[in-house]
Image (cartoon, rainbow, N blue to C red):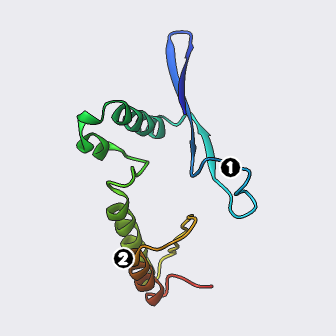
């Protein structure tokens, strides 16, 4: 969801970003994370995504400009792999590193392999 508000001569964009549909039937199984924000970088990405959804003929390259959100399915695998690789490199150097993923289920074999590599590097515990 996105909207804008005019205060004096300035337009403020704000939006509600969520990991799910906030369904009360599934709430006992898992929780959705929600963010109400006016952060200009997040809102720029939200606007890019909505503009793409409204006019898909603009092409996926339009979404490559997203700086804070990772549009799915086009870019998620590449970006998650980059983020995991960065955490593995940090862990191998002895720096603080962690990975937190929120999902309903995981069946992606390549992601499981990548997380296994992370565990082998000493990144994951528990």
Q: Residue under circle 1?
A: 23
Image quadrant containing the N terminus: top right
In-image side of 120 versus 25 (left or right): left
As displayed, is residue 112 above or below residue 57? below
Percent from the top left, x then y, of residue 117? 40, 85
Question: Seen from this angle, which residue lies furthest front?
Answer: 25
Q: Residue under circle 2?
A: 110
Mark before the other along the chain sequence, 1 or 2: 1
Q: Which residue is rendered at x = 55% and y = 68% of the image? A: 100
In-image side of 52 versus 3 (left or right): left
As displayed, is residue 4 above or below residue 56? above
Crowd tier of the residue under label 1, counting other residues whose Cα lies within 10 Å: few below 14, some 14–19, many 20 or above: few
Q: Which residue is rendered at x = 48% and y = 85% of the image? A: 119
> What SS does tag 2 mark?
helix
Judge depth for marks 1 and 2 and give the one in front: 1
Please tell me which residue lies in front, 83 or 91. 83
Question: Could you tell me how far apart the alpha carbons at marks 1 and 2 are, in whole angstroms?
Answer: 29 Å
Q: Which residue is rendered at x = 39% and y = 78% of the image? A: 109
Percent from the top left, x then y, of residue 85? 36, 73
Please tell me which residue lies in front, 100 or 90. 100
> What SS does tag 1 mark?
loop
Percent from the top left, x then y, of residue 42? 47, 40
In-image side of 102 versus 116 (left or right): right
Check residue 42 in the rendering and tell me which mark sits there, or answer none.
none
Image quadrant containing the C terminus: bottom right
**In this rendering, does residue 32 appear at all?**
yes
In-image side of 33 versus 90 (left or right): right
């Amino acid at each position: 969801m996105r909207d804008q508000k005019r205060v004096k001569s300035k337009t403020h964009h704000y939006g509600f970003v969520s990991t799910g549909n906030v369904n009360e039937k599934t709430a006992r199984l898992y929780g959705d994370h929600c963010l109400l924000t006016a952060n200009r970088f997040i809102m720029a990405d939200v606007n890019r995504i909505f503009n793409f959804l409204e006019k898909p003929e603009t092409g996926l390259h339009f979404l490559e400009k997203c700086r804070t959100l990772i549009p799915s399915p086009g870019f998620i695998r590449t970006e998650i792999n980059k983020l995991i690789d960065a955490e593995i490199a940090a862990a191998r150097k002895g720096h603080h590193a962690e990975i937190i993923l929120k999902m309903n289920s995981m069946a992606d074999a390549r992601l499981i392999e990548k997380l296994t590599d992370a565990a082998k590097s000493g990144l994951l515990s528990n």
